[in-house]
Image (cartoon, rainbow, N blue to C red):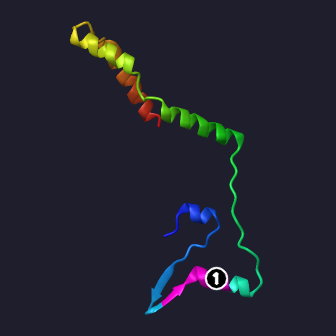
Amino acid sequence: MASIDQLRAGHLMTTTRSTGGNTSNAATSTAKNQQSQGIGSPQKDAVSLSSQGKAVGQIHQQLATEPSFDSAKVAAIKDAIANGAYKVDAEKLASNMLKFEDELRGL
């Protein structure tokens, strides 16, 4: 199977198909037909990104390099739990759970 780099470089993807013992190479035969008919090189596809698309790509790269959580905050919470200073506000927790459920229903 051809890699994406080979396809980008304009290399023909060669495939073989077996039908009743006959093996054919579709890409090679197509290329030979093009050459014999005097058709030039195969057309190449091109993709270009808008400035907005490039900006989204840059943001994605930045987010991928940052940690997904605040390790200092996690350490502070662990310390508070260990020494018994961490208190859970049950009403706030229940309110946030209901808010989350409402957001899920909106999806």
Residue 11 picture location, percent across and down: 62, 70
Question: Quadrant of residue 6 in the image?
Answer: bottom right
Residue visible at 60% across and 36% down? 58
- Indicate yes or no whether the magenta region holds residue 28: yes
**Relative to 84, 23 lies left or right:** right
Taking the image as drawn, is residue 95 in sight?
no
Question: Quadrant of residue 4 in the image?
Answer: bottom right
Q: Is residue 45 above or below residue 17?
A: above
**Relative to 21, 88 lies left or right:** left
Q: Is residue 2 above or below residue 62?
A: below
- Indicate yes or no whether the magenta region holds residue 76: no
The crowding category of the residue bearing disc 1, from other C-alpha atoms within 10 Å (few below 14, some 14 to 19, many at least 20), is few
Q: Secondary structure at mark 1?
A: helix
Main structural element of the magenta stretch: helix, strand or loop? helix
Residue visible at 47% across and 37% down? 107
Q: Is residue 63 above or below residue 89?
A: below
Residue visible at 40% across and 25% down? 69
Q: How many marks?
A: 1
Residue 98 picture location, percent across and down: 37, 24
Residue 30 picture location, percent across and down: 64, 82
Question: Quadrant of residue 62 in the image?
Answer: top right
Mark 1 lies on residue: 30
**Relative to 86, 15 lies left or right:** right
Residue visible at 27% across and 10% down? 80
Which three-letter amino acid code belongs to the residue tagged 1? Thr
Taking the image as drawn, is residue 14 in sight?
yes
- What range of the chain is rendered magenta? 23-32
Q: Is residue 12 above or below residue 77?
A: below
**Relative to 70, 61 lies left or right:** right
Residue 43 picture location, percent across and down: 72, 69
